[in-house]
Structures are given as C-alpha cells and as structure tokens.
Image (tube, helix red, strand yellow):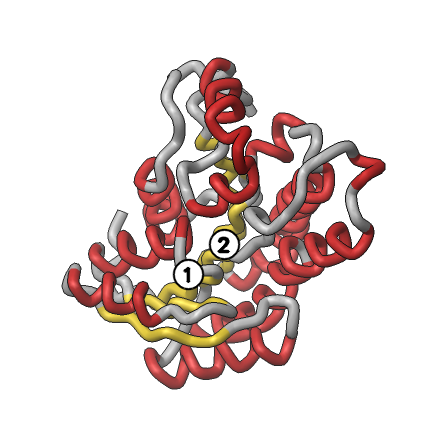
Amino acid sequence: MDVRDKVVAITGAARGLGQEFAVALGAAGARVIAADINDCVATVELVKTQGGKAIALSLDVGDPGSALAMVADGVAAFGRIDALVNNAALYGALHGGRFDAIDEAEWDACMAVNVKGIWNCCKAAVPAMRQAGGGSIVNIASLAATYGMPFGLHYTTSKAAVIGLTRGLAREVGRDKIRVNAVAPSAVLTEGTREFFGPKMDRALEAIKSGQTIQRNLVPSDLTGTVAWLVSDASGFVTGQTIAVDGGTVML
C-alpha cells in the first residue's frame, strides 16, 4: 500500500475526514494538495508535524474555474497529480426532515456541491492524470445512498449520484489507466455529523450502530486505510467499485 511520492489532491481538506486523509497520506509519504473553500493552513501544519509535504489551495468545487486553478497550482508545485480524493460535500450545514419539507434552494445547493463539484474536479484533474500516465480517483459516497437514509433525501440522493458517476466515469477513463472508485462510510464521528444530527446525534448514532455487524461507531481512522489502498498501486486492478466501510450494515 505504498503511496510514497504520489501527489494526492484532497478536496474538503480543511477539517473532518478531508483533514484526516491529508494527515494520514502525508505521513505515509504522499505529497498532499489540501484544497477547500475554507483555509487549509491548519491541515498543512498537521501534515508537516508528521514529516509530510503539503500545500494549501483555495477551492470552490462548485466553480469549474476554481477546480482548474487548483489543479494547475498543484501541478506547478509538485509536477503532476496522481490521485484525487473527492471528499468535499455539503453535509453538516444541511437541514434534515421530511422529503416534501426540504427547501428547494438547499436541495439545489446540495447537488451543486456533492455531485457537480465532483464532476468539476474530475474534469480538471483527469487531463493532468493522463499526462502523468494514469491515476486514481476516490469519491466519498455514503451509507445514506447504499442503505437509503430517510429524512435527508437531498443528501441521500446526492450520494447515490456519486456512486453512479463513479461507475460511469470508470468505464470512460480506464483506457487512460485512470481508476475511479467510491467509498461509502456510515456516519463518521466528525464535526459534520454532529452538525447534521444536532441534538438527535446520540440517538441517531445508537440506531446506526445497532444495525451494524461490528457494533461501534465509525471513526475517521477507520477510513484512511481504505482510501490509501485505493490511492496506491496495490489496488491497480480495482475500478468502478463502491467499498462500504460501514461495520457490516450493507453487504454489497
């Protein structure tokens, strides 16, 4: 699972899972492009304390020009891009509730970031990967899509779209030696999960845990190994797959 010297762009890297991926991959020897609409300076400092190399770049995934600029600046800094981890998503800021009570503007914003944002970043990164001779794209989906989470239909639908995007894109870019896979975690103990569930968090986490074969809640470090494997050449014949990291809730 060697990621040494691979150049990995991670979106949504200012906090939560994105920050965890950046620190873990940086510590393993990858050169990290930490990109977010928010400041990633703290993430870069964490990577450096582990002996890794990283840069912080501004990125609005909903803006195709911003995605192109992120890739161009990353290539200028490190010479190429080998992998893209599409982690940025609207989650904690969303309001749950019945499907017919979801605000239309919030629905549209969710799709613009969680689906179109991945499309924008893939469009920007794939040409750089072609120049590098291949690469790996890892899209962060969710148990919400594979299980069918109610009372958050905008988020659930967006993550189902990520799985479809993953499969279709994998068929398109395989000839370029670019692999595309998704990871579908259950609710992870991050700031975003706390924000999404709010005062109902303890009850929600207990319900999620009770449906798992491994009965404990997911922590960020449970995901870093899977992402590192998909970034590495050890998964070189794996593409178009959705790997559920959910303690055995959905057996795909």
Q: Amino acid at mark 1?
A: Ala
The relative height of residue 140 versus residue 42 in the rendered view (above or below) is above
Q: Which mark is residue 13?
A: 1
Measured in 3D between alpha carbons, the distance from the residue under mark 1 to the one under mark 2, in whole angstroms, is 8 Å
Disc nearer the start of the sequence (1/2):
1
| Discs 1, 2 touching: Cβ within 8 Å | yes
- Residue displayed at 33% across by 71% down: 41
* Apparent side of residue 146 relative to residue 41 in the rendered image (left or right): right
Question: Residue 250, percent across and down?
Answer: 55, 22
* Residue type pointed to by label 2: Asn
The relative height of residue 149 versus residue 121 in the rendered view (above or below) is above
In-image side of 179 versus 166 (left or right): left
The one nearer the camera, 94 or 14, is 94
Q: Residue at x 40, y 51 (%)?
A: 16
Residue picked out by circle 2: 87
Residue 197 location in percent, x, y?
55, 36
Mark 2 element type: loop
- Nearest the viewer among 212 and 217 is 217
Quick check: 103 above or below 112?
above
Where residue 6 sits in the image (x, y, percent)? 31, 64
Q: Residue furthest front?
A: 199
Residue shown at the point (31%, 64%) measured from the top left = 43
Residue 42: x, y in percent? Answer: 30, 66
**Residue 49 lies in quadrant:** bottom left
- The residue shown at (57%, 66%) is 121
